[in-house]
Image (tube, rainbow, N blue to C red):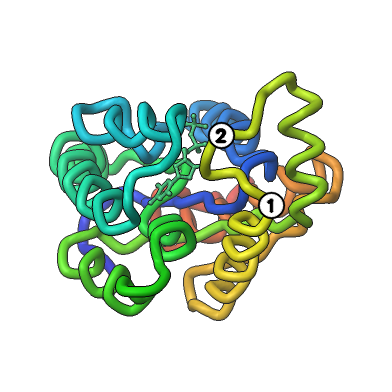
Amino acid sequence: MAHTLPGLLVVFEGIDGAGKSTQIRRLSLLCAALGLECVSSREPTYGQYGKQLRDSAAHGRLSRAEEHRLLLLDRREHIETLIRPALSRAAVVLLDRYYYSSIAYQAGPGLSAEQIRADNEAFALPPDLLLILDLPVDTGLARIGARGDQPNAFEARATLQHCREVYRSFATLPQARLIDATADLDQVTAQATAALVRALLARRLLEVDAST
Ligand code: TYD
């Protein structure tokens, strides 16, 4: 079910090193150039619940059930304080991760992907566009290393391999686009831009002036 607010919700998913934050910066510049209000944000947030999750990544992980509980609280707060108000003002919201990451990272014995999806879809606004930046795990880990970062507790190779497969499985959703993130940055931006422009036209946030 699509949301009925005037704005556009665009979600970026993909393993670390896929280039989500770079593409979000570029698309937010494009939105500004088009005269559209653009709000960029990320999950986990830096709010009270998101902070607990971020802190846990530095010391080893919490149980998956506890992570799921905190992520639901964080996401509810994020939607009510930032995402819904921005969409109500007809802004474009660019999100670095959303509940698809919970399905990728928190599912396992005792907590199924279906349960996580249902718990989230009970309240989460559905995205208008889901951009999946896909790349092999080794390429992602090499990029994390090249930018001088140490992989965190979420970034074990086997975990990332599983997450990549889960993200790829979302490509069949009607609002999803799978983008090859091994391509150079400009090519990835071109594909993301094309998808964004189509979505803006469909939502009538952008008009084509046929007279010029
Ligand atoms: P990350 O995108 O690495 O944070 P940063 O904003 O610092 O770049 O997100 C932190 C980690 O949180 C990431 O490795 C994946 C994990 N995560 C989950 O496990 N479940 C979720 O639902 C979300 C949104 C993130």
Q: Residue at x 36, y 27 (%)?
A: 55
* In-front residue for pair 16/210: 16
Q: Earlier in the sequence, mark 1 or mark 2?
A: 2
Residue 20, located in which quarter of the rendered image?
top right
Lateral position of residue 6 relative to residue 144, left or right:
left
Picture layout, residue 83 above or below residue 100: above
- The disc placed on residue 157 is 1
Q: Answer few, some or many: residues within 10 Å of disc 2's Cα (few below 14, many 20 plus, some between 14 and 19).
A: some
Q: Is 174 or 53 nearer to us in this picture?
A: 53
Q: Amino acid at mark 1?
A: Arg
Quickly name the residue at label 2: 152
Q: Position of residue 143 (x, y in %)?
A: 78, 34
Q: Is the CB of the residue bearing disc 2 within 8 angstroms of ligand 1?
A: yes
Mark 1–mark 2 CB contact (< 8 Å): no
Local secondary structure at mark 2: loop
- Answer above or below: position of 17 versus 209: above
209 relative to 134 in the view: left or right: left
Give whichever of 118, 195 is nearer the camera. Answer: 118
Res. 136 visible in picture = yes
Q: Position of residue 34 (x, y in %)?
A: 52, 34
